[in-house]
Image: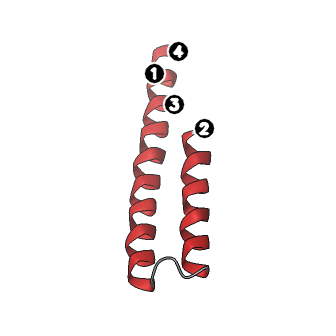
């Protein structure tokens, strides 16, 4: 669910740039934050999967 919400946020950032609500520098900053959040979210998910795998052994 979190991944979907993050991608929805990414879409709205792109849309905001395309419609002229934010300038390019704001777009770059927001996109960077989305990428960083995506990295942390993926790392968290991998940690949960790895933890579950260890518990099942």
Give the mark nearer the N terminus: 3 vs 2: 2
- Residue 57 visible in the snapshot: no
Please give the residue where the numbered disc 4 appears in the rendered image.
56
Mark 1–mark 2 distance (CA, rounded to whole Å): 24 Å
Mark 4 near mark 1, Cβ–Cβ under 8 Å?
A: yes
Please give the residue where the numbered disc 2 appears in the rendered image.
1
* Helix, strand or loop for disc 2: loop
Q: Position of residue 5 (x, y in %)?
A: 57, 47
Mark 4–mark 2 distance (CA, rounded to whole Å): 25 Å
Mark 3 near mark 1, Cβ–Cβ under 8 Å?
A: no
| Classed neighbour count for the residue bearing mark 1: other residues with Cα under 10 Å, few (<14), some (14–19), many (≥20) | few
Judging depth in this view, the residue of 48 and 20 nearest the camera is: 20
Q: Position of residue 27 (x, y in %)?
A: 45, 76
Mark 4 near mark 2, Cβ–Cβ under 8 Å?
A: no
Give the mark nearer the N terminus: 3 vs 4: 3
Please give the residue where the numbered disc 3 appears in the rendered image.
49
- Residue 3 visible in the snapshot: yes
Mark 3 near mark 2, Cβ–Cβ under 8 Å?
A: no
Mark 4–mark 1 distance (CA, rounded to whole Å): 5 Å
Side (left or right) of 12 relative to 36: right
Where residue 36 sits, quadrant-wise, is bottom left
Please give the residue where the numbered disc 1 appears in the rendered image.
54
* Helix, strand or loop for disc 4: helix
Q: Which mark is residue 4?
A: none
Judging depth in this view, the residue of 54 and 38 nearest the camera is: 38
């Amino acid at each position: 669910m979190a991944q979907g919400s993050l991608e929805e946020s990414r879409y709205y950032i792109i849309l905001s740039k395309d419609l002229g609500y934010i300038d390019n520098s704001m777009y770059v900053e927001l996109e960077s934050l989305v990428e960083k959040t995506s990295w942390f979210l993926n790392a968290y998910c991998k940690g949960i999967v790895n933890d579950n795998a260890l518990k099942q052994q």
